[in-house]
Image: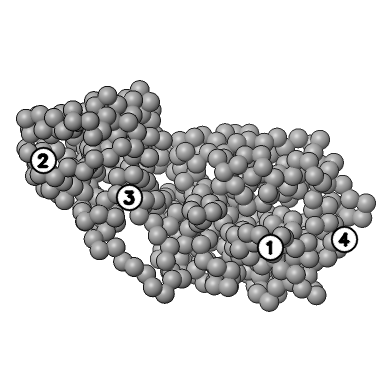
Amino acid sequence: MDYSIKTGDITKQRTACLILGVFSRRQLSALAQEIDKAGKGALSKILKRGDMNGESGQQVMLYDVPGVLAERVLLIGLGKPRDFGLKEFRKAMTGVIGTLDKGHAIDAVCGLTDLEIQDVSIYQAMRDAVLAAEEAVYRFDETKSDVKKRPRPLKRLTLFLSDRRRLKTAQKGLEHGQGIARGIQLTKNLANLPGNICTPTYLAEQARKLGRKSNKLKIQVLEENQMQKLGMGALLSVSRGSRQPAKLIIMEYKGGRPNSKPVILVGKGLTFDAGGISIKPAAAMDEMKYDMCGGASVFGSIQACVEMELPLNVIGVVPSSENLPDGDANKPGDIVTSMSGQTIEVLNTDAEGRLILCDALTYIERFEPAAVVDIATLTGACIVALGDQASGLMTNHQALADELLAAGQQTGDRAWQLPLWDDYQEQLDSNFADMANIGGKGAGTITAGCFLSRYTKKFKWAHLDIAGTAWKSGKAKGATGRPVSLLCQFLLKRSGQSE
């Protein structure tokens, strides 16, 4: 969709639809009051008939409203003014854009971006307006043979701003919103593809395709023979059960000063996870194509960096493999040697994500990172603990955790910090190796974090477990694009570009 910002007289906006807000008890927003005045009380008269009272989510479409040049006026209920915050703003934006995209208005002027939103700057309002709009119009139909096209989908959205003095800041928010939205779209598209299409080789090809878009982006893909020479026995042990060769994908975005240390994002790229010999139950196993959502979020974040021309050095690393049962697959009780030289007893072959991540975490030591964040659909225990509301967060550096938590709060893509105490490390003890790959029934998310922490002694590191937030099940099944918003806000803040 095309986006722009307009200022001026709201009554003079020539458009197929003008979007205006109404608060509870039929209280017109400031722009709606201007329209009402120009139309000699037309909106007030309609509201008094009782079709809407401004409760959150209510919508009324009006035609031929006097005093305006718009063909239609869409009123959206906003609830109580004192309760109208970022969450309510996003809900309103998603609702009206979804309505218009199914209707016959190919363009619209949105007055919601001119509202006073609690603790939200005009920069963030514009940015989140774009993100909410793109969420509403997103469709995945790449694997359907008969795609029914909407007759007149929404193509152009103009975000209205009454105060020209804030135009420069608003424009920056719009541009950043578009960049992040494209990153989220890439993340969703990769994650929604089935495992027979989105293989490790396919991901590597998409990285090279992304690299051709910018001279600031360098792509490198390590093959299995190269990983073998580096001693990546943990990563390669996972791919032994698959006919698809593993890949280690490195995407270096060089937007900052040449000698400044990079921020590194490491994403788990299991393009399909059957559990290996410790095979998963059949129910909902199709959703294990989403086990590469961590890797997909790294792709999306790197794309957003390119789109926003972020003045920061960022490296995305995606270890990618399949985890399938086979005569050569890992067996419970096998012992593998990681790139760090530490040995691992594989007590459960379905705890494979940490095996591919640990070698990737050792590999990135060569870049001397300023900070490292790994992102992975790592444990079902995280879903039990936090549901689909928040991602789990663990760290060896509290200041880094605070940055990520703040980014999550600001974007609504929240995380919740879990402890990483030494007490939990004992659960990984093994009689036969330096450590086991699982820590028993209790604290499964934390012991997975403890496992990874043993490979992060040389840098500041945080771990995001997105098992509950990366996709939705049931009728609304599909990737969410999380935590790209969180990661992009974190990177924007680090580069001094967030406001």
Say few, some or many: other residues with alpha carbon within 10 Å of mark 4 (under 14 / 14 to 19 / 20 or more).
some
Q: Amino acid at mark 4?
A: Gly
- For the point 63% across and 69% down, the residue is 247
Mark 3 surroundings within 10 Å by alpha-carbon count, few (fewer than 14), some (14 through 19), many (20 or more): many
* Spatial separation of the CA atoms under disc 3 and disc 1: 35 Å
Q: Nearer the viewer, mark 3 or mark 4?
A: 3
Q: Residue 209 location, x and y as percent?
A: 46, 70
- Under mark 3, the amino acid is Gly
Q: Report how far apart the C-alphas of labels 2 and 1 lie in the structure.
A: 56 Å
**Quarter of the C terminus within the rendering:** top left
Which disc, if any, is residue 282? 1
Q: CA distance from mark 2 to mark 3?
A: 22 Å
Earlier along the polypeptide chain: callout 2 or callout 1?
Answer: 2
Q: Mark on residue 216?
A: none
User: Residue 492 vs residue 27: left or right?
Assistant: right
Quote the CA–CA distance across marks 1 and 4. Answer: 24 Å
Dot placed on the residue nearer the N-terminal end, 1 or 4: 1
Across and down, in percent, residue 494 comes to 48, 41
Q: Do the residues bearing badges 4 and 2 touch, measured as CB atoms within 8 Å?
A: no
Residue 460 showing in the rendered view: no
The residue tagged with tag 3: helix, strand or loop? helix
- Please name which of the two marks, 3 or 1, marks the residue nearer to the observer: 1
State the SS at label 1. loop
Residue under label 2, please give it: 65
The N terminus lies in which quarter of the figure? bottom left
Residue drawn 40% across the image and 42% down it: 497
Q: Which label's residue is closer to the chain start, 4 or 2?
A: 2
> Residue 484 at what x, y percent from top left?
49, 49
Q: Which residue is mark 3?
A: 98
Scheme of image coloration: one colour
C-alpha separation, residue under disc 3 versus residue under disc 4: 52 Å
73 relative position to 243: left or right: left
